[in-house]
Image (cartoon, rainbow, N blue to C red):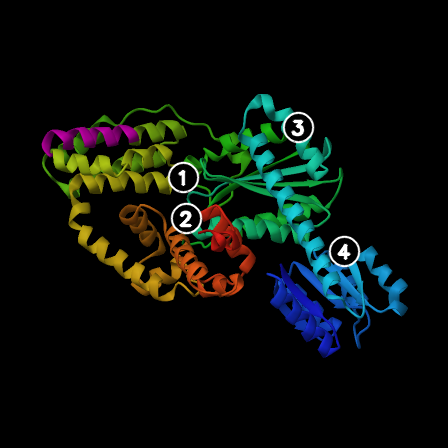
Amino acid sequence: MRIIIVEDEIKTREGLAKLIESQTAHVVQGKAANGKDGLEMVLRFKPDLVITDIRMPGMDGLEMVRSLFEQKVRFHAVILSGYSEFEYARKAIHYGVDDYLLKPLDVDDIKKMLDKVEKKLQKEQTANAAVSLYLKNLIAGEEQEADENCRILKELCGLSDVGDYELFAGYIGSAQPSYRENMEQFARGLQERYPQLKIYYIYLENRQEGYLLGCGEPGGERLRDLETAAYYGLILKQHSNEERAVWTKKRFTSLGQVREAAKELHSLLAYALVLKPQGWLDAAAADQYCPKPYAAPVHIYNRMRSAVCQDDAKGLAQSTDALLAYLSNGHFESEEIRKACVKAYYLIADTVQELDSGRYEHMKSRNLLRNIEAAVTWRELEGALKDAVQAAAGTQEKREDISNYVIKRAINYIREHYQEGLSQEQVATVLDITPEYLSILFSREVGINFSVFLKRFRISHAKRLLKGTDLKVYEIAGAVGYSDPKYFQRVFKEEIGVSPGEYRQMK
């Protein structure tokens, strides 16, 4: 656990901190001598546990805890008090305090208290993981299990059959990798900001979709506040020069409607290809979209085939642009547009196979067709088709040395700076290329995206430090670029399957 100690007596404060760090695996994140400094520290660091004295000059411990309670901050706290302050300390229980310890402090009592709070935290984390699992099952699992998933969610979360519900659904595959990583943190921030609401976030890897569910009492106004905050957080904070995640939403009045709402929103996201939204997909615009009958542009396909036969890279690029313009301006169904690009790929690939088997094998090895078929946004589809055209024209092989050189520079820079708060944008700036191009090169040359590579690189170094040094886990977290030890432990367990402490004990 990450702990903050608030105590005006320096001997007690320092002694307690030393005891915790020498005899437990917990981390003392900060120490304060009064309630005012303690309050600022808690709001800044958001620790797992606050241990505070009851009587202090200025703002005392009870006032600090009350302020945290009134600000709707989620926290665990333990009060330190003398026998004469026993009744005074009991008042703090009303503000969410977990326990109180009587002075003088006993080592065994402190350890028991820490174990008790840690078990409570672990229970909360287990419950959160279970909520995520059953919410995923409700949204994307088997239809016949929906009622059972609803029942379990009601038991775990206290969700009611009738209430105010709002579901946000977003396609995240088109955004920068860092966007997905920031989503969980954003959802936690909403939970802290609106504790009277129940807010849950899940990510469906196979669809590259995120779902944010907000639940409130019937007729409550807070759900509107959440809607505004989510809109600004999900949409307007995205960088305008990058391709954005695409989000949409639906409001309803019962837990049993979650699954149908998710299905509806999933279908709605398909309109991102034709509406080309700037982050927010309006359901009304999708309802009003009236596609025209599609007619295959045979003359453009013929020009594309002719260009491949003549090894005319410029002509192939021009005819591809003409096809994309026709599809973009034609007001067609999303699926018709995607099929048209798939047909273009087969036309090009079949012609290349007849003329140059080596180049054809190169095209096949890059899974270009899969990228076209999986594209959700216009920019993804356009980029996937152009990648296929480049491979067919041979321009990709000519640029291979350049690509490898850029990736080598990127990896060297990561190797030298992985201990810092690196981002894809920062590395791209150093290399004097766009973040989008760096992302494309990583996926193409390394086989994984930038964020996954950086994560695995850091975890690899963390494993060596865990086995080869006596550094504490929070020190190792900082040494490999994670400012939050708790987040580092979660990432480590997701990647390796065990916690850092368990890994260190493995032979």
Marks 1 and 4, Cα distance to the nearest angstrom? 49 Å
Q: Residue at x 13, y 32 (%)?
A: 306
Residue at label 4? Answer: 98
Give the amino acid at mark 3. Answer: Gly
Whether 394 is drawn above or below 458: the answer is: above
Residue 37 at what x, y percent from top left? 70, 73
Q: Which mark is residue 243?
A: 2
Q: Is residue 351 magenta?
A: yes
Residue at label 1? Answer: 377
Marks 3 and 2, Cα distance to the nearest angstrom? 34 Å
The span shown in magenta is 342-356
Query: Residue 435 versus residue 85: which sits nearer the camera?
Result: 85
Give the amino acid at mark 2. Answer: Glu
Q: Which mark is residue 256?
A: 3
Secondary element type, mark 2: loop
Q: Is residue 180 left or right of residue 120?
A: left
Residue count near mark 3 (Cα–Cα under 10 Å), binned few <14, some 14–19, many ≥20: some
Residue 278 at what x, y percent from top left? 47, 46
Q: Are marks 3 and 2 in contact (CB under 8 Å)?
A: no
Q: Give the number of the mark in front: 3 or 4.
A: 4
Secondary element type, mark 4: loop
Earlier in the chain: of badge 3 and badge 4, it is 4
Q: From where the camera sits, is residue 321 visible?
A: no
Q: Is residue 405 magenta?
A: no
Q: Are marks 2 and 1 in contact (CB under 8 Å)?
A: yes
